[in-house]
Amino acid sequence: MDKKIRVYFCTGCGIGDAVDVADLQKTAKKTSKNAAETRSHEMLCSPEGRAMIESDIANDGVNAVLVAACSPRVHQNTFHFGPSTIVDRIALREHVAYVLPAGEEDTQMAADDYVRMGVTKIMKTEPMDPAVTDVQASILVVGGGVTGLSAALETARAGVRVVLVEKQEKLGGWVASWGRKFPTRPPYRDLVDNDIVNTIEAVEKHPLITVYKAASVLSISGQPGEFDVRIRVGNDEKKETIGAIVQATGWRPYDATKLTHLGYGKSKDVITHVELEEMLSKTGKLVRPSNGAVPRSVVFVQCAGSRDPNHLPYCSAVCCRTSLKQARVIRELYPDTGVTLLYKDVRTPGQYELFYKNAQDDPGVFLVKGEVTGVAVDQKTMTVSMTDSLLGDAVEVGADLVVLAVGMTPVSEEPILNLQYRRGGELPVGKYAFPDSDFICFPYETQRTGIYAAGCVREPMDSDACSEDAAGASLKAIQCIACTARGAAVHPRAGDLTYPEFFLSRCTQCKRCTEECPFGTLDEDEKGTPKPNPGRCRRCGVCMGACPERIISFKNYSVDMIGSMIKAIEVPEEDEEKPRYVAFVCENDIIPALDLSSSLRKKISPWVRFVSLRCLGSTNLQWINDSLIKGIDGVMLIGCKSGEDYQCHFIKGSELCGVRMSKIQETLTRLALEPERIAVKEFSMGDWESLPDWINEFVDKTNELGPNPNKGF
Amino acid sequence: MSEKRPQPIVQGSVLVVGGGITGMSVAIEAAEAGLEAHIIESSPTLGGRVSQLTKYFPKLCPPICGLEINYRRLRVQERVHVHTLSRVTKLQGSPGDFQVTVEHRPRFVNDRCTACNACVDPCPVRRNNDHDFGMSSTKAIYLPHAMAYPQRFVIDEQACQGVSCSKCVEACSFGAIDLSQKTTTETLRVGAVVVATGWQPYDATRLTNLSFGKHDDIITNMMMERYANPQGPTKGKIVCPSDGREPETVVFVQCAGSRDENHLPYCSGICCMASLKQATYVRAALPNAKIRIFAIDIRTPGRLEDFYTKVREDPNVSIERGKVARIDEIDGQLRLQVEDTLGDKIQDVYADLVVLATGMEPSIRRDPLPFDIRQDEDHFGITDVATGLIVAGCAKRPFGVSDSVQDATGAALRAIQCQAGRSE
């Protein structure tokens, strides 16, 4: 495509007062003869301003529009002119007019630089060519418990085909072996029937669902929209082409044999609440396993191994309600049997409090708050000892049967998906092995595009919550297929039509891109050449930052593009005493933070030039080289928080950037520069008001080092 | 440029009542899957309760970060139509074909507004700032908050002096202010309706035994979010509202009106975590302050337990079992009478600042919808896919943010289901 660029300057919002726009128009022309055509308008975002641009597109064949006005975070729709017009933005308002003193030379110089950078950028921007894919509109559900069944049914009810793989011979998982359930619907007071058989039947009869029982996934290769899945069913092997995947592999009870201090394994009459559930639902009876007699006193030990740093430090969220339910069942069956629950806290959030309240009304159910310290077993009876947290006294409770309410652990680490990915076969797991999203606002933000965990493998939850979670994961799976079909990225760069392209003839097979990609996107051939899988890609550009050969590029984002923008900055001679700083900033957190602080007109040093990056992890060392060689006096790299509570939606952008910067020392030595001229800063977007202060302090401190001696070379 | 247009996997349309984190999530998730979506939000901005929070538990990350990403998804998503200052007045039809009458109240500021701020100084009148629960004020023409979406000013009709003043109109160089705007209505046709009307803090003035409203140094947990916020009424300083001094002892009263037959019989699920989080606000702002949290049970399910464990290790934070029965002012100090939960012992506790951990009440209890949905006795809604009326987020259950978004994502699927096969 021959680009016909036109630069549109807005003089509104104080831009016209802050800078000489006519002069900026000359700067655009001087930057490139291709950007010689410019226009200005007093309010570019008005219908009249937009009409002016539309008319140029229709009548003059303009197909690349550079809007020098406000931040790209505003008026995105106003300045959208359809898929065949390239649009880019220069934030003259937020980076210049709002934050620099009007009419000063330094202010004009800043605006001049932003115009040069903007023109350079749009010159290097290529039209989109989305990786449109012939997708399979089908979902693979791994696991046929309550979550998997719900995922299958919910997806099929939306009109999408499902392949369900269950390792057991029967569907239903844990819930199939349970009796009545605690209520999850109003009025939340009485036990409800277990209707899992209806769900199983609905799944098995649904025309859009293929069920493979006694089956396992042998391998998954490819990418969203076109995963090749091999499934072992008995002695057969089935092949399916699948669009997206829901992993619903559930949980298993915490291993009670580790709870010897609670008597498990020492007496047959110490059982888990899972064992109790199976006994009650299979036999309809409650007996002491040691002698077959009906127990007169049953003691439930809540948090058995849970909320315990030596076992499971977390809470499994469901056990309180399960024990209250089992207490109810026991009391209905055996009115003479007393039930005691020993608990740290009763956790019945939301409307489940009503069920708890109802349970408290039974005089045969005793609830005692405290820390259980041990279960002593002698030949006939057992004694549970605890510290009563209210009175602080040691208390002993005799029991015929002790039930340990053990917690849930995720089934996430054994071979389940067998992904044929360079970066491993399973979903990456976090703390306690849950393959959960780390984002509060985005619970389905997966590290493997197109594969969504749901149910207890993601987080301990009750069976009703599992069904709801399955619906959410199913939506995300369907959505991923819809986006992949048109070559668009999924969250967080939802809708992005670009993807990384590799100039492979210059690849040295160093494998940094495949290793650093946070999403396991890239595979390698035998020689180590990366195989891009655009459907798995989230478009963060970490691979681009990692590549020492600079062969990875997007249509509108490349090492050369950013490098050229830096080179477009005019660096005054040393004796002019006008230092220059470049701040590479994350567009997800830091650009919004700068926009917000600019709205308060918080002043920023006029010597700083901001360069927006998709993620700090996409920073290529070449840009730092380019900056320093050019005589830039200091470089800031500002991104989001790393560490345990990281905020990077590309997992560890700031961290990767920090690691890369640690390798810049050689360059610094060669150029005889101090390491303090480069700073990697992690900033929480919530602290936006203080961001300009940090930037100005960095500028002040670095100025004290004196100018970069490489100016003018 | 490829001309190939793939077949949509799913299609249809959905109208979402409420533009908080749940409603936004429903609309965006549905639209990214292929549906048209309308968000009907009664206030001038999206963001809802989340925009009032300072940090999220347990990561202590800024809620505006999630808003930003959602706004970005909205900005590039042509299938989502945002209607602020709007409400549904009538609903007719059936799944796959609802006719929804929507009333749009005037903003008095049109889309020429650039949020440049020039109108603010000339405006002669102030209004109570509901974003800060009335603890601060704005001019009658105001931007709801820094992260408002759309980034446009709005005029409070009650406070504005109208055409006779018009100082803002003169100050605006963009012709963005139009005091002649009137309420309009339109009818939208959609396949499904999602109720995501969220929650309101329980009215603490009804907790007469806890003296809220009688003493300025008794605040609610949501007020604490604003006090701790750098953009809040005290610019993030935690002080005693009565005299501006820094509190030495801060006491959190858990279940203030919750798990209580006289108020909210249920548990709101999030208040324990909120208070633990707010304890970290106090610790960060006032390193010497002592914090006491009185609770019947501490409810931090799942891996949230880790946060509880961490806060509990702080020597300045004491988490104690007890139910606060009364608060009185005794000789200029706040005295809390704390019952142990068996009710036979009472201890007196003194505090400089008291935070009432009040619960969540579904918004539709006080502001009923103009159409019927199934509800439980506490006015939480119940989804019925067969009717095409889906309930999501805190309109359905007291949820934290993460659970709300999870629920919203599932609700988007149900919106597809109730019109699947009908649109062909």
Image (tube, grey):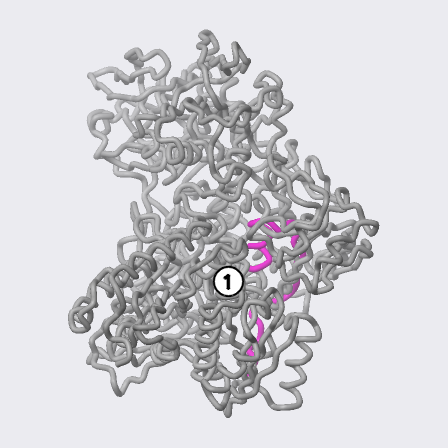
Q: Residue at x 27, y 17 (%)?
A: A385
Neighbours of disc 1 within 10 Å: few (<14), some (14-19), many (20+): some
Residue B165 percent coordinates (x, y):
80, 49
Label 1: state its secondary structure. loop
Can the viewer see residue B132 in this picture? yes
Outermost residue, front direction? A575
The disc numbered 1 marks a residue on which chain?
Answer: A
Identify whether A532 is placed above or below A645: below
Q: Is residue B24 left or right of residue B56?
A: right
Q: Residue at x 81, y 53 (%)?
A: B183
> Closest to the observer: A59 or A432?
A59
B18 falls in the magenta region: yes
Residue A290 percent coordinates (x, y):
26, 24
| Magenta residues, start to end | B4-28
Q: Is residue A710 left or right of residue B207?
A: left
**Which picture quadrant has residue A554?**
bottom left
Identify whether B334 is placed above or below A598: above
Q: Is residue A223 left or right of residue B389?
A: left
Quadrant of the drawing holding the C terminus of chain A? bottom left
Can the viewer see residue A232 in this picture? no
Disc 1 marks which amino acid? Pro
Residue A645 percent coordinates (x, y):
35, 48
B199 falls in the magenta region: no
Q: Which residue is mark 1?
A: A101
Residue B421 percent coordinates (x, y):
65, 65
